[in-house]
Amino acid sequence: METTVLTLVQTEVNNEGYLKNMNDWSPELAREIAAKENIQLTTRHFEVLNWLRNKHAEGVPLSIRKVGNSGIVDIKQFYALFPGGPLKISSKIAGIPKPASCI
Amino acid sequence: MQDILEKPVTKVAEVPVNKDRGKLKKVLIICSKGKLEDVYAALVMANGALMEGLEAKMFFTFFGLEAITKKNADHLHTATVGNPAFMPGMPTIVAGLPGFEAFASYMMKKEMDKLDMPQVSEFIQMIEAGGGEIYACKLAAEMFHLKKEDFLDEVKGIITVGDMYALADGEGTQIIFI
């Protein structure tokens, strides 16, 4: 439970790095979190991030399979955009909670 | 001078601490069974490893080969006879009736569908797209008279046991046998 200063907004992340308050999210914040994961965000990344945020807002449980069938990106591209655990990392950058999914 | 010779100076070399030591980096999952639940256990674990950023390799052998053939991958069954965990109390004579096994497998697949679990062939595609590698066992393939064309396109190769062990090379690798 640490308070981290990210950009000009003081926001809290939990011990795994996930945003505590989803309303604190902004594209600049996303860039900072992504930088920590060694990812440079492009328009493509933001397309996926926005899709994730929308689905989370709708209450749809997320899984790798859903992302692959989303029409925004296929699984190979998803792994290429967010290497090393794409669902975990992209949800961290998108400011949504870690998905509890096994698929 | 005498002093120095009588007390040899020994110094233990400092071993650089590898903070990554103990971390799981790769899994090799061997699937030797062809039943629905066994194959899905293997697939979920392989996909799960990829989702966590690990490397995953799969090796299908004996009845596991059924799960990666074009013909049977999406038509696997679960055992109703000889499976005491399946509907405990179900008498074998009923579980063995014609059509029962197919029906039970159908019901199980329906439940899996509700949980968004894909069909075996799609699951294999997902694993391969995520960077997983899928191999078939040469010995078992010869035993069942299966050739490369019989397997799904995602199967990378038909390999021997030695090659399979080579897949598990590297620190932080675990081999899981199903």
Image (tube, coloured by chain):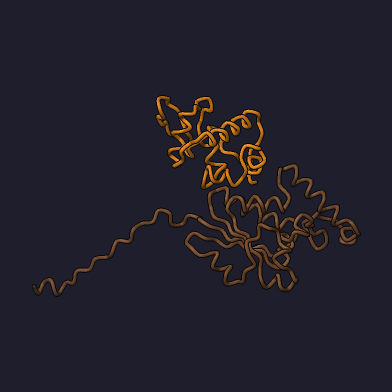
Chain colours: A orange, B brown
Who's the residue at 28% across and 64% down the image? B13
The one of B29 and B155 positioned closer to us in this rendering: B155
The one of B12 and A85 positioned closer to us in this rendering: A85
Q: Position of residue B116 (x, y in %)?
A: 71, 43
Q: Position of residue B142 (x, y in %)?
A: 71, 73
> Left of B64 or right of it: where is B105?
right
Question: Is residue B155 positioned above or below A83 on the image?
Answer: below
Question: Is residue A60 positioned above or below A74 on the image?
Answer: above
Residue B158's image quarter?
A: bottom right
**Mark count:** 0
Q: Position of residue A42 (x, y in %)?
A: 50, 35
Name the image quarter holding the N terminus of chain A: top left
> Left of B123 or right of it: where is A9?
left
Who's the residue at 22% across and 68% down the image? B10
Instruction: Report the residue that reaches farthest toward the left.
Output: B1
The one of A77 and B97 positioned closer to us in this rendering: A77
Question: Is residue A44 positioned above or below B53 on the image?
Answer: above
Q: Position of residue B43 (x, y in %)?
A: 66, 54
Who's the residue at 70% across and 71% down the image? B140
> Left of A20 or right of it: where is A56?
right
Residue B160's image quarter?
A: bottom right
